[in-house]
Image (tube, coloured by chain):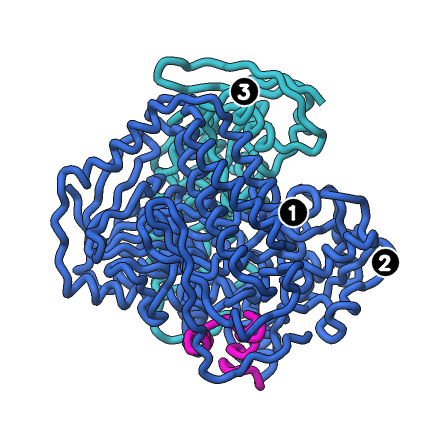
Amino acid sequence: MWVKVRIKLNRENFKDYAYFSLELNRNSTLLDMLVKIKEEIDQSLAFRSMCRAGICGTCAVKANGRPVLACSTKVLVFGEEITVEPIDNVLVIKDLVVDHEFLYNKLKLWKVWYNAEEEDKKVNASVLKRIEKSHECILCGICDSVCPVLTASSYFGGPTLLTRYYKLLFDIRNTAQEEKVQNLKNLNPQLCTHCMNCSFACPKKLMPEALIKEEENLLQEKGIIKREEGNFGFLEF
Amino acid sequence: MRAYDVIIVGAGGAGLRTAIECARDEDIKIAVVSKVYPTRSHTGAAQGGVNAALGNVIKDDSPETHAYDTIKGSDFLADQDAVFFMCENAPEVIYELDRWGVPFSRLPDGRIAQRPFGGASFPRTVFSADRTGHVILHTLFEQALSKDNIDFYNEFFLIDILHNGQRVKAVSIYDIKNGEVITLRTKAVVLATGGFARIYWQRSTNAVGNTGDGVAVALRNGVPLKDIEFIQFHPTGLAKTGILLSEACRGEGGYLLNKFGERFMSRYAPEKMELAPRDMVSRAIEYEIREGRGIGEGTSAYVYLDLRHLGEEKIKERLPQVRQLAIDFEGVDPVTDLVPIRPTAHYCMGGIHVENYITSSTPLEGLYAVGECACVSVHGANRLGGNSLIELLVFGKFCGIAVREYAKYNQHLPLTKAEENAGREYIEKLMKREGSEKLAQVRRRLGEITWEKMGIFRDEKSLTSAYEELSELLERWENIPLVDKSKVFNTNLIELMELRNMIEMARAVAFCALHRRESRGGHYREDYPERDDENFLKHTLVKQEDGRLTIEYIPVRITKYQPAERKY
């Protein structure tokens, strides 16, 4: 099939859409398409790719407005006219390549790792089930790129961080569990408006919004934040 | 100029595990350099699991049995002392990961579960559903991030290691984000840059970045490579794309069927059937296709993987990623459909010659190698599934200890201005490169030569022709123009440098394969179909001097098990 592709280029001396027209087979992924353009038409096109199998999280782009992993998305679903752009709300380095440093900086800043003791603790299957999604995050940055709260407020931790933080709160193998619960309040999960953008966009279907809701509940149960502060003031006499 | 005690190149499982161990001494300053962000590394693609004789499912399992299985699987080419070292240390590194938070799948009593895997006598493979590599990589990354004495150089490409012929003294690296070349002084360098199975460009399970950069740099610097003729072809690559479906498919009980619906493995490995080692299963599939029992013909032929009898629940619980990959990339759902598969290039048993398995040191002082880019050798002529992750965990840990101690008692060597500038000059030369060849065409030709002439089946004629044509290809590489002249995120330049590394590696593989006139493990010569212990029970060492390759052989260390016929 023939497709018409519009790619947003971002270079020092050129910031505009470039137009390509090429033939693809029906099984082609967005990544196949970008590779073909790079190999046959414009060798200077910049995008990232690595595993080609949806696990390394490096190739997120926006296609017809939807943020997706280029390697795991068929061109066919977009029809014959496709616009490819970098994902939103992050610094663009070149063309479709965006800054990933911010993802890693957040993990370092908020110490998103287990503090371990030298003794083994048995963790049961139900806990593992619970933290599974937190461990499955591939750091593609898509959820943060669609979060309206994160765009508006620097107080909000954002879905990537809160998804990965979740495991530290509920796994007994993390010896700093209590400290993480205390620090969670600084990430302000209660600022989430539950718009579900992140859950709809996550390519691994990790439902970050649901995890954020649980984190908010945890803070309330522990009495660290108050339930729905002020929101329902009109009900009070 | 910046200086570190230790520089680790590569931030996959091997590099990160080494870094964590190094960093236990807070006075040691470490740089971890990687051309991709650490969590993009190919360790994350490992699906099925990691071997350690915990004996959780069947008590009788032991490190000794693990060692025997590994040695037999290697077609007796592995160094047995190194294998025992790995297997004995395997359980402890698994428990470490458990403490750091890796969500290993569990038995009902809370102990770590284990599944059967190819070539293993007991269910020994520890796993986290079918995304074991992903959770291990991310956990190791988080632990490395917790160390304040590690600096990450993300998206820096390795140009060269600098040394004085005896000892390393610096690395020269290219900053992909801004086009600058920087030199970092160091007392020791650990190469952990992964394999080069991407030389089979059109049909490989490997990530596009697995271009053997570290191995090629070692080769160019006169460091010997060991046993690189042994390439593993994974039996169950998706037919259309070569994307990996985990060995866990067979471990959990999947069948392989030809076009008549026969479980054809009964002809090749009547006892182990689908759970025979990878080299045997891959050849069996190719024989079936050759004899007309596959589906389709030529390069698009395949056989079937049948998981349907496992049931929806088990497939969803144990093989969720496999199911998703089959749906996304082949358009079939393993719950209800047969999955078309065919062997695909997967792993490099050989690599940089490690002389001392306890420290992972190489013949060049101060240079170490761990993970797939190294050859210890624990995999010999064929690696067992689940042994690559355990290799990088065990040898990464002990390399980390060794290199940390080495750095404590050694000083930086002086560096001349000329050495410091060499990397920048190389890049400037490439930036000016004009010519009439096309990068993509040369790369595609590389993939055709490797697959057709040095693939699963090889002989004198095909290998000679591969070697000659790859030598020509290397000349053609000199004539590929650099189209993109920009400094910011110039992937055209990166691909050009990667292509050189791949062609040089492919040529060296062909050279070594040509000289090994026997069949063993992953190396199958149709003109010498038998294993020849009298002449070839030895490791190949290949060196490059002034562009010329030379070969010598060193003995295999056989400490316990005498070579025997390999039956499954």
Colour in which chain A is shown?
cyan
Mark 2 vs mark 3: tell me if same chain: no
Of the residues shown, which amino acid type is indicated by label 1? Leu
The shade of chain B is blue
Who's the residue at 54% across and 75% down the image? B534
Question: At numbered mark 1, what does the secondary structure look like: helix, strand or loop?
Answer: helix
**Is B68 on the left-hand or right-hand side of B287?**
left
For the question of whether residue B318 can be seen, the reply is no
N-terminal-most mark, 1 or 2: 2
Q: Where is residue B146? Give x, y as percent.
A: 30, 55
Q: Tell me the residue at 26%/63% (across/down).
A: B403
Label 2: how many Cα within 10 Å (few below 14, some 14–19, many 20+):
few
In the picture shown, does residue B502 fall above or below B57?
A: above
* Label 1 CA crowd tier, 10 Å (few <14, some 14–19, many 20+): many
Check disc 3 and report the residue beneath it. Answer: A41
Q: Residue B338 vs residue A27: left or right?
A: right
B555 is higher (above) or lower (below) than A105: below
Q: Which residue is mark 2?
A: B261
The circle drawn on residue B325 is 1
* Circle 1 chain: B
Q: Depth check: A227 or B153 in front? A: B153
Question: Magenta residues, as a range?
Answer: B60-87
Secondary structure mostly seen in magenta is helix
Quick check: can you spot residue B8? yes
Label 2, label 3: how many angstroms apart (C-alpha)?
A: 44 Å
> Label 2 sits on what residue type?
Gly
Q: What is the C-alpha distance between the residues marked 1 and 3?
A: 29 Å
